[in-house]
Image (cartoon, rainbow, N blue to C red):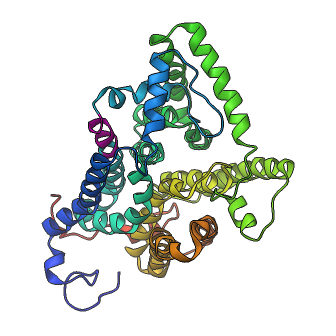
Amino acid sequence: MAEIGKGDKTGAPGWLSDCRVQARLGVLTWLAPFLVMAVLVALDPLAHTVMPTYHLASADWWARKNLYIGAGGLHYLPQFAVIFSPFYLLPVPAGDVAWLLCGTVLLATGIWRFQRAQFGPHIARIFLYASVFAMPLCLPALRKGQANAILAAFSLHAAACLVRRQWWQAAAFIVLALWIKPLALVMLLLAVAVYAPLRWRIVPALIALALLPFLFAPADYVTGQYRQFLANIQLCVTITEHRFADIGGIVRTFGWELPSGASKSLRVAAGGMALWLWCTSARRLSEPFRALWLFTLSACYLMLFNPLNESNSYVLLAPALGLWATAALEAAPTRKLGWSIASISLSMGLLPNLLHFAFGNYFALFWYPVMTVVFMGMLIYWFRRPESPFAASERTAAVLRVPPGGCPEP
């Protein structure tokens, strides 16, 4: 970042240049919202939250009832009812607060862990900025207790493991993400297309995931729930209400509607395009940017082409925005890119709330996917620039090297 007066090279005032202060502020960025959310949930566990749906799923699982009740109920694998059971068994609201805490901690540690190897002694400052950029867009999902927050966190931890070549841990986190929501299948398919050591390790992890429910319920009940899950997913893709922030949210803003057949074809074609883009871009990028691009591309595809993508689902994209912004701000050639991405992230996190009185949620349904397209376009443009600090070469890799003399890790 450019120098702006006294303080460190970021332009921060002198007191903010202290690593301990930066670390505490970074933690506070996540802790303060969590405490507010915990109080709100404790006062009224049923208000503005999706956790009652999760409680019902766990209750139905142990009662051997059908988990799927149409478009308004559970859309996850049957395994989700098992993983949520510890929170269901806790008294209300303790279980709900614990679920919120898990989402907050996993997201914060995922951002820290991804940046730690890259920025070493400057991790406190980088973590603070990434948190400030990402947190506003994470808040709606965290407040409602949506599983998307934990899905984003597990996916981010998987990407951090790929950077470190921790193949078994990466496979475990990807399967954990799939356990939370089947949307993680997008990252799984993209990851095994490029990271060859991951392929044979993911197979036993997937087998374990598939067999897990049989440890907790009779075989006929489990297989029946698998069939109900597939039927529920087919039902969900036919929904055309104007309450989703995918590519259809842009079209519906202008009073149009994509025909069902054209919509499905577009999503399949976009999947093929995402795979091609990932395979071609991965060769151009060095780590950790290759793994970060995997996380980003998976999130962008889901934001634009998941037919049930709500505005709260953009918690999946928030860490990518924060991580790319801070990484770009650390290199002189991409400083403007960094500020642009930071502006996109903050606009997505703040503008829909500021303009809610005038447009309701309709502004978010349009603004989020539009900004996602802009964000992707900016990254793809910079991947192809010869001076790009993200490219896989010794010359450009040195651009983002952390200078000596940084603060020790807190």
Q: Nearer the viewer, residue 108 or 140?
A: 140
What residue do we see at 21% from left, 66% from top?
Answer: 25
Residue in view at x 57 percent, y 15 percent: 222
Residue 329 appears left or right of 271: left
Image position of 169 with respect to 385: above or below = above
85 and 15: which is toward the camera: 85
Answer above or below: position of 97 versus 400.
above
Q: In which quadrant of the rendered image does the C terminus lie?
A: bottom left
Find residue 360 and report its image quarter: bottom right
The percent position of residue 78, horizontal first and vertical second, equals: 54, 25
- 306 vs 98, left or right, is right
Residue 36: quadrant of the picture: bottom left
Residue 116 screen position, x and y as percent: 30, 55
Whether residue 375 can be seen here:
no
The prevailing secondary structure element of the residues shown in magenta is: helix
Q: Nearer the viewer, residue 256 or 215?
A: 256
Residue shown at the point (40%, 49%) measured from the top left:
47
Residue 205 location (% of width, % of height): 49, 24
Q: Which residues are magenta?
A: 92-100
Residue 14 sits above or below residue 300 on the image:
below
Q: Indicate whether residue 321 is drawn in magenta.
A: no
Total numbered circles? 0
User: Could you tell me residue 211's position as x and y percent?
Assistant: 52, 16
Left or right of 52, for residue 7 = left
